[in-house]
Image (cartoon, grey):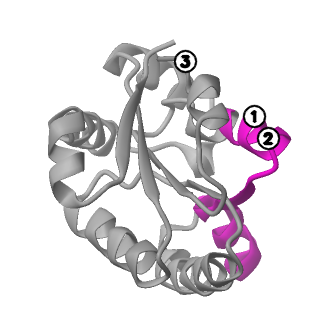
Amino acid sequence: MMPTSVLSGLQAGTLLIAIGPGGAGKSTFAAKAAECGMVVVCLDTLRQEVSGDAGDQAATPAAVERQNELLASHLSAGTSIYLDSTNVEPHVRAALVKRARAHGRPIVALRFLPTLDTCRARNAARPANRRVPDEVLAWQHALTHEATVQALLAEGFSAAHDATG
């Protein structure tokens, strides 16, 4: 399913979670989500805000804290949100599901599934401070493939889709 078709079917107030390795197209998709009226919350942007460097992994805890503040505010207001970060770890997704459910909002997963070679090529084209180490990229890719639609539904997502186009 093409990701843009997912956008047209979302209920108002949905939290749409990107799931995928670095270089999978999650941030490229953010522009489409914004065009459809969704608020985009991007972890890289938040790292830039808190540290001055979008690639500063040491700033991730502070960026996640800010992300959670923004999510709480937007979920309370009933805003449709696209969360642009890897979200490949089950415990990260569980916290997001819990947060959406606490606000009575639907939460939808969108897996980005390009080949590992495609992710590697895109990663290599990034600025040095934004490149993901190859072993981390391979780990993220493997975890994305483990997060099948069935597994995501079992985790509590309202719906789950694959972005294959």
Q: Secondary structure at mark 3?
A: loop
Q: Is residue 163 above or below residue 51?
A: above
Answer with the quarter of the image where residue 39 lies.
bottom right
Of 145 and 97, nearer the camera is 97
Answer with the quarter of the image where residue 25 lies.
top right
| Side of 146 where 34 appears, left or right | right
Residue on which the image places disc 3? 2
Q: Residue at x 67, y 85 (%)?
A: 73
Between tags 2 and 1, which lies in front?
2
Q: Are marks 3 and 1 in contact (CB under 8 Å)?
A: no
Residue on which the image places disc 1? 32
Q: Earlier in the sequence, mark 3 or mark 2?
A: 3
Q: Residue at x 39, y 70 (%)?
A: 96
The percent position of residue 2, horizontal first and vertical second, equals 54, 18
The CA span between labels 3 and 1 is 12 Å
**Magenta region includes residue 37:** yes
Of 91 and 96, nearer the camera is 96
Residue on which the image places disc 2? 36
- Amino acid on which disc 1 is placed: Lys
Q: Are marks 2 and 1 in contact (CB under 8 Å)?
A: yes
The CA span between labels 2 and 1 is 6 Å
**Magenta region includes residue 35:** yes
Q: How many residues crowd around disc 1 within 10 Å: few (fewer than 14), some, or many (20 or more)?
A: some
Of 84 and 77, nearer the camera is 77
- Amino acid on which disc 2 is placed: Cys
The percent position of residue 30, horizontal first and vertical second, equals 69, 42
Which region shows up in magenta? 29-55
